[in-house]
Image (spheres, rainbow, N blue to C red):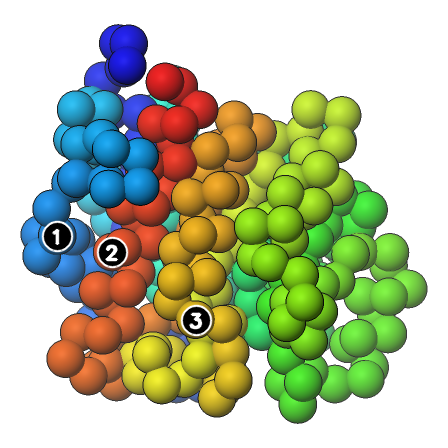
């Protein structure tokens, strides 16, 4: 299968929570996900490969007081892993998406795209876990290279839907995913967000998943995606070399039951790692 570089994937904990619309625990979700990773093997039946042979994961640790982190500080930490194929940022609430992409862009969004897998548009006014997409658009992110997948009925307002429509971003609703496979949706999103060779940030907000599977996600609703769909999505997205940062957000471990949510998040990390190995095999 060829030689792999050492540590093609880096992991960073960014536990934002203080501006969340839904109050949540300060207890570290990134550390809980790291603990859950130990529950799994590293063998992929699908790819017939032990992903541990890929070089492992470089753990960059956690950023303390994540809600107050400056773009300069976060950019410097992420830059340590510039040679990695993918940098995975563990939240925290969805404010992580704004922190991560604005730090990466450093004011220049001309070569950046965004894909969100999320039940919500995140177009709220102000600064919270409900506003990262609006904040990024206001800072200069081109809406024609923004794709939002999984938008759910009765989870968004008509006002914010109109804001997204008028901006020109692409929306693939939960209803559309009943007839469009998650793999095809991911491929469509990559073509739009990554057009012209743009680098892509991907946000996986676990509230897109059916509430029965993610008790640790305050905003999840019945009728969301299945864990398997989200796992497929992570592997397909991470296999594309244009995707160089990815976040996993909206888990409150104080609400979790039997580690259901953090164990799924750990599997998303492993799926993304397996996807990276596909791109460099």
| Alpha carbons under labels 1 and 3: distance apart | 20 Å
Residue drawn 22% across the image and 30% down it:
49
Other residues around mark 2 within 10 Å, as few (<14) / some (14–19) / many (≥20): many
User: Which label belongs to residue 226?
Assistant: 3
- Residue at the spot of label 1: 40
- When the figure is inspected, residue 223 is found, relative to residue 183, above or below; the finding is below
Q: Quadrant of residue 140?
A: top right
State if disc 3 and disc 1 touch (CB < 8 Å): no
Residue drawn 39% across the image and 55% down it:
231
Residue 275 image position (x, y, % from top left): 39, 36
**Along the polypeptide, which appears first: circle 3 or circle 2?**
3
| Residue 20 appears anywhere in the view | no
Question: In screen coordinates, is 269 left or right of 159?
Answer: left
Question: In screen coordinates, is 275 left or right of 32?
Answer: right
| Alpha carbons under labels 2 and 1: distance apart | 9 Å
Tell which of 172 and 158 is nearer to you: 172
Other residues around mark 3 within 10 Å, as few (<14) / some (14–19) / many (≥20): some
Question: In screen coordinates, is 62 left or right of 278?
Answer: left
Residue 37 image position (x, y, % from top left): 15, 52
Other residues around mark 1 within 10 Å, as few (<14) / some (14–19) / many (≥20): few
Residue 155 image position (x, y, % from top left): 63, 85
Tell which of 204 and 47 is nearer to you: 47
| Alpha carbons under labels 3 and 2: distance apart | 15 Å
Q: Quadrant of residue 26?
A: bottom left
- Residue at the spot of label 2: 266
Question: In screen coordinates, is 94 left or right of 158?
Answer: left
Residue 85 image position (x, y, % from top left): 40, 25
Q: Quadrant of the N terminus?
A: top left
Tell which of 202 and 80 is nearer to you: 202
């Amino acid at each position: 299968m060829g030689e792999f570089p050492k540590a093609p994937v880096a992991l960073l904990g960014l536990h934002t929570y203080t501006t969340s619309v839904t109050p949540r625990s300060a207890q570290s979700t990134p550390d809980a996900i790291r603990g859950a990773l130990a529950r799994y093997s590293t063998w992929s039946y699908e790819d017939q490969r032990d992903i541990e042979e890929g070089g492992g994961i470089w753990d960059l640790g956690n950023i303390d007081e994540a809600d107050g982190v400056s773009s300069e500080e976060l950019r410097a930490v992420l830059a340590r892993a510039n040679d990695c194929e993918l940098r995975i940022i563990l939240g925290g609430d969805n404010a992580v998406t704004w922190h991560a992409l604005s730090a990466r862009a450093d004011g220049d969004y001309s070569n950046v795209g965004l894909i969100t897998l999320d039940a919500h548009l995140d177009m709220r006014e102000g600064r919270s876990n409900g506003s990262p997409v609006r904040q990024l658009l206001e800072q200069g992110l081109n809406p024609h290279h923004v794709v939002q997948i999984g938008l759910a009925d009765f989870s968004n307002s008509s006002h914010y839907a109109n804001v997204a429509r008028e901006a020109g971003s692409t929306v693939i609703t939960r209803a559309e995913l009943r007839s469009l496979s998650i793999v095809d949706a991911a491929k469509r999103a990559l073509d739009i967000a990554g057009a012209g060779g743009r680098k892509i940030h991907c946000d996986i907000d676990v509230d897109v998943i059916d509430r029965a599977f993610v008790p640790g996600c305050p905003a999840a609703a019945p009728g969301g995606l299945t864990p398997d769909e989200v796992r497929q999505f992570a592997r397909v997205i991470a296999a594309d070399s244009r995707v160089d940062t990815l976040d996993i957000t909206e888990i409150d471990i104080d609400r979790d039951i039997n580690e259901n949510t953090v164990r799924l998040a750990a599997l998303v990390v492993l799926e993304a790692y397996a996807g990276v190995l596909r791109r460099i095999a």
